[in-house]
Each structure stands twice: as structure tokens, then as C-alpha cells.
Amino acid sequence: MTDTVQPSSHDAMSFSTEEQRRRMYRRIARSQQLRYALLVVPLILYLLVFYIYPVAAMLADSVIGPQGLTLQYFARMAETPIYWRVFSGTVWLAVITTLVCLVLAYPLAYAMSRASPTRAMVMFALVLLPFWTSILVRSYAWMVLLGRNGIFNDWLMRAGLTTEPLNMLYTTFAVYVSMVYVLLPFMILPLYSVLRSIDSTLLRAAEGMGASRGKIFLHVVAPLSKPGVAAGCLVVFILALGFYITPALLGGQRDVTIAMLIAQQLDMYEWNFAAVLASLLLFFSLLVFAIFDRMIGIERMFVR
């Protein structure tokens, strides 16, 4: 005959109190989740109305014509070599601009990361200064600087390097110079953030072990700065792909970009073909983004 232990009233009360406490915690958690969801709703609505819907409409226009579903606009793109030349030229322009920005930005970002707080703040303010001016105004400023009667030609002639003004405006050179100037801060900022976060004790340890400055840079600083290099290159490259104002104002007839071609098609009321070109630019940008994510990892580039 087995004895049965009956739960005491104290145990029952403890169980009831614990269950009530758990229910209360669940209610609080649900209320907090609802509160957070309500905070996110405006952002979701904004993205739906001003981003997702326009992109979806653009993609739909690329495959829907007056007679319904069609691929004739993509076939037109594939059969016309000039469009592919413009696209390849745009990619090449973005690649060169990205590389030049990297070469110019890395030394400056490194100097900013090793400077005193006061000097770093001054240098940081100078880097951000162009953001306070419209890109249209900055493009017009380069038109003044690079013109036949501009400051650069005046300096060259006064120095005796040229006897007559050079044709720098409305050339590929002018496009590269202005785009590098506009996009350079987008390369400096992620580089500076990563270089600034490198532990200085690692550098001192390498120096204490007899490594020269060159070896410290190659074997310590450069590997640790790869996420900043990748982030800066990704941002600058994607922004350069969609540049319109600067090439349109400073470039010549051969410096046509895919964004300029899209605008030209819209002026001709070729909405469907403009949607095809925009879709191609979107898919290529997503492909570049996916390649960077596969090789390096987006979370490593933007999360420190």
C-alpha cells in the first residue's frame, strides 16, 4: 500500500502565484511587442508607398506593353549594341572612380585615425564640408574651374606649362575629376571608422617585436581595414553607377551614362524601355551587393 502525498495549500498558492507572474510577464512582453510594431508601421508604410510600389511598377512596365505581357523591350535591349556600350562604359566609369577614391581616401583616413582628437575633428569637418553644398552647385563650380578661362587653365598658362587654354571641360577627364570629388567623402567615412577602431596595442606590440612601419601596415593595419575598404568601395561604386547630374553637365557626347540614357528615354515617352534600362541597373547593383556579401559579408562591413 503506497502513501500519497497531497499538495499543501502553501504549495498550491505558490504555484498559483508563479503562474500569475508568468501570465503577467507574457502580457507585458506582448504589449511591448505591439508597441514596437506600432513604431515600425510608419516606416513600413513609407517604404511600401515610396519605394516598393515604385520599384514594382517599374519592373511591371518592363514586361507589360499595350498588348499585355511581352519581352520585346528586353529583346530591343539585347539587339542594340549601343545600349550595351553605354552600360559597359558606365560600369567602367564607376570602377575607375571607385579605385581613384580608394587611393586618395586611404592615406587621409589613416592620417585622421592617428591624429589627435582636435586635429581629427578639424579634418573630419573639412571632409563633411562638401555635404553642406548641393551637388548641382558643386558641379557648376567645376565647370567654372575647368573652363577655358577657368582657374586651372590660368594657372597652367602663368606657370608656362601651356601656351593656350586646354579643353578640359566636356571631357571624360572632367567627369572623373568631379565624380571623385563628390564621392570621396563616402570612401573616407567608412575607412576612418574602421581604422579608428583598430586597437593601438596591436600596433605597439608589432613595433615592440621589431616590425618596421611598412610591415606593421601590411600585416596589421591593412588586413584589419578590409571591412572599411569593402564598405567604401561598395557605396562609391553603386552611387557612381547611378550618377546623372555630373556626367550630364561636365561630360561630352561620348560620356553618356545609363542614368542619362534612362532620362533620354523618358523625355521621348519611352516609358517601357526606360523601365528595362532601370531594371538592368537595379539587377546589376543587387548582383554587386550579393558578390560583396558573399566574399566579405555585409555585417562585417557595416557593423563594428
Image (cartoon, rainbow, N blue to C red):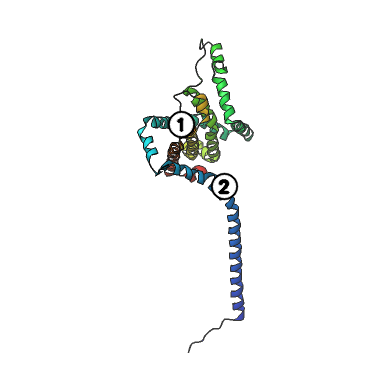
Residue 234 horizontal/vertical position (percent):
48, 38
Q: Position of residue 2 (x, y in %)?
A: 49, 87
Number of residue marks: 2
Residue 249 vs residue 222, the one in the foreground: 249
Using the image, tell me which numbered label, if any, was put on residue 46.
2
Rendered view: 30 above or below 53: below
Taking 233 as reference, is 118 left or right? right
Question: In percent of the image, x 58 and y 74: which residue is there?
Answer: 15
Q: What amino acid type should be assigned to the residue bearing mark 1?
A: Leu
Amino acid type of the residue that numbered disc 2 sits on in the rendered structure:
Tyr
Question: What residue is shown with label 1?
Answer: 261
Residue plotted at (47% across, 42% down):
58
Q: Position of residue 255 (x, y in %)?
A: 46, 26
First in sequence, mark 1 or 2: give its number: 2
Residue 64: which quarter of the image?
Answer: top left
Question: Residue most toward the right?
Answer: 118
Residue at the far left in the pictured view? 79
Q: Is residue 105 visible?
A: yes
What label does residue 247 carry, if any?
none
- In the image, taking residue 83 as reference, residue 117 lies left or right, namely right
Q: Nearer the viewer, mark 1 or mark 2?
A: 1
What's the distance in space between the residues labelled 1 and 2, CA to CA?
29 Å
Q: Secondary structure at mark 2?
A: helix
Q: Residue 57: x, y in percent?
A: 48, 44
Taking the spot 58% from the left edge, 62% from the top edge, the residue there is 30
